[in-house]
Amino acid sequence: KLCGYLNKLGIKGPIKTWKSRWFFYDENKCRLLYYRTAQDINPLGSIDLSSASFDCKMENGEGIFEIRTPSRSFILKAISKQAMMYWLQQLQMRRWEFCNNYMKDPKSNGILSCLFTFVYYFVFTFVDVVDNEDFLPLVKTPTEAVGLRAASLPAPQTSTALQNISLKHPWTEIQNTVYNICGSKQLWGNNGNVFSFDEFQEHPENVDEEQEAEVEAGCAVKEGTLEDGRMGPRLNWIRKARWMNSGFLGSEELLREKNSVDKVSVLQQQILTLTEEVKSQKELVKLLHKALEAAQQEKRVSSMYLTAAEDKDRLELVRHKVRQIADLTSRLEALEQEKKELEQMLTLRDSHIQELKEHVQLLMEKNHAKQEVIMTLTEQMARELSDPLQEANAITVETLYKQQEEIEHLKDDIDAYKTQNQFLNSEIHQVARLWTSVAENEKALLMKCACLQARNCQMESKYLTVLRKLQEAVPGLPSSHAELVKNLIQEALQWNVKEEGDEGFNLNPVSEYDEYGFMTVPDYEIEDWKLLAKIQALEIKSNKLRSQEIVEKPLRDRWNSMGELNPSAELKSLIRSGIPAEHRQRVWRWMVSRHCSPVPGHYQRLLEQSRSTEHPACRQIELDLPRTLTNNKHFSSPTSQLIPKLRRVLLAFSWHNPAIGYCQGLNRLAAVALLVLEDEESAFWCLVYIVENLMPADYYSDTLITSQVDQRVFKDFLSEKLPRLMAHFEQYCIDVSLITFNWFLVAFVDSLVSDILLRVWDAFLYEGTKVIFRYALAIFKYNEEEILRIHDSVEIYQYLRFFTRMITDGRKLMNIAFNDLNPFPMKLLRNRRSMHREELEAELCELEQIKAAYVKERAEQGP
């Protein structure tokens, strides 16, 4: 047991006095209780060590150290330097053990019990191993000042008897005094020794009974304090009896007793370990049973919904699902609150670590200064001792003795500062380990929070899907039921608004805009499409949350470890998987600069030219600016900050490339480049790179001849890769180029959701137009079965108008594009382009001839 007498610095108004206190460590609560004497039953106070830090400053005096808690600081003083270092080292060890045990104990964490059972099994398997870096050697126990035997020694005396009494706790002092008087009357023998317990403790007749008594006493000591914070009377006297009896045993008896106790302790430890393991297994079985019951319950509810004969029963089941969603939301709130508390604790830890670092730095500077003083004095002595005659004339024996004495004092100070430095290093090391544990704890909470958010998204999506089915059936419902369905739909569409208004933070996982400013829920005017957009946003967020730890985090780690960018198969694979937002700007700049070297000052000269001379395309540019990325908050208003930048980029390009000037579609390409690269000159060169390097010639010319060629090539690929779908289109006379022409012209801008769109652009900027063909085919493959189920040409065209917006799983689309559609050689693409270009040019030439003949014929006929 960690206990002993220490002097505590008390403050009585402006006067500071040292008071002797008996300190006892409570293992269950990680608190340091302090009493006036070892015989007291009620503590005067306690120090919470679970969130405390320790410090010792040699300039304060020998044996003085400090315990800092978030609420206050305690200054204590041991009888010697050894006792001080022992207390500090033991308190560090007990704090570390308590923090580990607290985090490992599943019962102490409420709803997080299942999570910590699995997470901390892996985390603390390695954290519990003590590092080999011994900053401070193990200090021997000073038995005269610390431990159970110290209780039998008289308490250190103060200058006056009243000085040691706690004036802050008069009632506790009275209780302890009365208790000590009553205990003394019962226990004092003829010799008046308060530690004689012969009449209270009978000696066991055999070894087994003796071991039993020791185990009982040991268990009693482990119980610590009672629920009301007081030491149990029987526990106190048993402890005192054990201390006294242990002082009268012989060496052989001590050895025999120690061996027996060790065996019993090992067996008890094994029993406790096995009991905890059985408990954890039972908890796991219970969790599995609960999961199975929940799955069966959900299956029964689904069956009831499908077999329900009346709409009233179905609506009741829908309300039950609403209540489940509310329950999940409340659990999510509790997790968010716990996360905030952990973040606050982490902030406190970080600030304390910073204070310790600054203190260590200050001590190192002081130590360095003192070392320089010692070196100077040593050199001075060496010079003086080298010349005996000068020494005899200039210095006396007494002066030399004083200098040597001063040097000895400085050496003692150096040793003291070295010891202090070692302890502070150990304290910093342990606090850093505790901070790591808290960080792991926070990570586990974030993982569970993400899982709950994903599940919440799925539940909301299912609920909205049910509402949409009911919405389609509204014409056949009674008026009261139709009104109820309409109200439920209106309420579901207003979830975000309500939560943002009522709470300080938004628990709904669907935010209004993403990190690039795109709307996550499109603002459709048609009521049916609004509900569809909300379902789509929930599914996208759910997929993102589910893949966050499994896919996104390893991918982000690989990007973080990526140094200088060089073309390689690994980089190509990483870019196809999607560039994280924090790396996307750097990688896009690198891809543009590889093929299109920016000319210094060229962009500024183009801007000057556009300011001095109006370009013919200026009017068309002004018309297209308000129509650019209307679903993005950075372009949705004429006063948005990026609108002037986009205007300057398009005008500069129209002067840079007079052959094209401006073509509708270039505004969207430049807008996406501005969103990612932010700098307008970088966006200008990105637009130049796309139009002049990535896209074939004449792609944005007046005739758009190459764009038409690509549509014919795409139809060939669609017939080869998806023959069933192409036959379905031919059966109902569907011209897919009416849908896909815009895909190729603007690289899917305004067609795909922003997250998938930017992944397509990542690969497009690195590999070229082949990526557009891959993704265009993948989009049709993704929705092939849905299209094949439609058997009306008008309905097919209506579905093709918005079906790209229904793609929510970007990973699945990427796998289709780069795995399922292989092989896709670039050589084949070039050959097809060349063949169809010749055919198209021949057709255009024939049309020109027909047109010329028609004009000639009309001219001959006259007016």
Image (cartoon, rainbow, N blue to C red):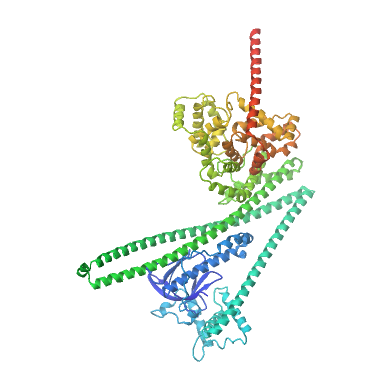
| Nearer to me, 292 or 495 | 292
| In-image side of 788 versus 817 (left or right) | right
Quarter placement of the C terminus: top right
Residue that appears at 57% across and 55% down: 443
Q: Give the residue furthest to the bottom.
A: 190
| In-image side of 110 versus 95 (left or right) | right
Residue that appears at 55% across and 84% down: 252
| Nearer to me, 670 or 278 | 278
Report which quarter residue 383 is drawn in.
bottom left
| In-image side of 472 versus 245 (left or right) | right
Q: Give the residue furthest to the left.
A: 393
Image coordinates of residue 832 in percent, x first then y, are: 65, 28
Image coordinates of residue 791 in percent, x first then y, are: 76, 34
Image coordinates of residue 387 in percent, x first then y, are: 23, 66
Report which quarter residue 338 is drawn in.
bottom right
> What is the tally of numbered marks visible in this picture?
0
Location of residue 379 with respect to 212 vertically, above or below: above
| Nearer to me, 486 or 751 | 751
Location of residue 381 with respect to 667 vertically, above or below: below
Whether residue 240 appears in this view of the structure is: yes
Whether residue 530 appears in this view of the structure is: no
